[in-house]
Amino acid sequence: MSEHIVLIGFMGAGKSTVGRLLSEKLSIQLLDTDAMIEARAGMTISEIFSVRGEDAFRAIETDVLKELAQRQQPAVISTGGGMPMREENRRALRELGSVVYLQVKPETVCERLANDTVRPLLAGGDRRQKVETLLAQRGPVYEETAQLKVDADSQKPEAVAEEILVKLHMDL
């Protein structure tokens, strides 16, 4: 395997869980861009949004992506839900390797994140409405960015990981 597997999709799509499973199956490292951003900033994503604002967060996100482009060793990369929203990030993601969009419906996101209190873009107001609005904006961008789309809505994470491996012709 010579390139990265990059997982994109909305929050709650299962990028971290599926990423961990792929990493284990392929015996390669899992890199979580949100964790990398937090390490670089020395604060949580919620704190970055609160203290420095979303623009600062997006700038760090782009810097992390540039850092990943320098990496020679193949990895599974789990991205934050908003990473593909910048055009420069979409190009960079495609250059990293195989970009896989984990697709979910708004109701699935709301169900999976019902008890989540740390996602700044869902704080306050009607969560369902926020999810629907953001997903309507981001869905077409995810589709444009990805080479492969996988339904992460009605399958267990193990099945999603297996489908990705099959579609990428990486049967183990």
Image: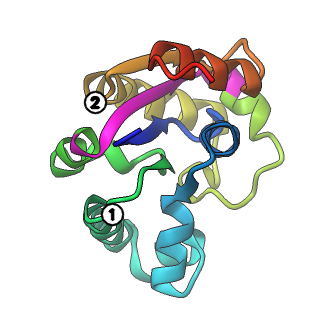
Q: Position of residue 129 (x, y in %)?
A: 57, 31
Q: Quadrant of residue 13?
A: top right
Name the residue type under label 1: Arg
Q: Position of residue 7 (x, y in %)?
A: 48, 38
Element at label 2: helix
Q: Which residues are magenta?
A: 95-108
Q: Nearer the viewer, residue 28 or 63?
A: 28
Q: Nearer the viewer, residue 153 or 117?
A: 153
Q: Is residue 1 above or below residue 136?
A: below
Q: Quadrant of residue 144?
A: top left
Name the residue type under label 2: Thr
In the rendered structure, which disc, 1 or 2, sits on the residue that comes first in sequence? 1
Q: Quadrant of residue 84?
A: top left
Residue under the image location 40 percent in, 73 percent down: 53
Element at label 1: loop
Magenta stretch containing residue 101, yes or no?
yes
Q: Are marks 1 and 2 in contact (CB under 8 Å)?
A: no
Task: Tell me: 88 left or right of 109.
Answer: left
Residue under the image location 67 percent in, 17 percent down: 153
Question: Which quadrant does the N terminus fall into?
Answer: top left
Q: Is residue 12 above or below residue 108?
A: below
Residue under the image location 39 percent in, 25 percent down: 139
Label 1 environment density (alpha carbons within 10 Å; few <14, some 14–19, many ≥20): few
How many numbered marks appear? 2
Label 2 environment density (alpha carbons within 10 Å; few <14, some 14–19, many ≥20): many
Task: Tell me: 10 left or right of 153.
Answer: left
- Mark 2, residue position: 145
Q: Nearer the viewer, residue 129 or 153?
A: 153
- Mark 1, residue position: 71
Residue under the image location 51 percent in, 23 percent down: 170
Q: Is residue 84 above or below residue 103?
A: below
Q: Position of residue 22 (x, y in %)?
A: 63, 37
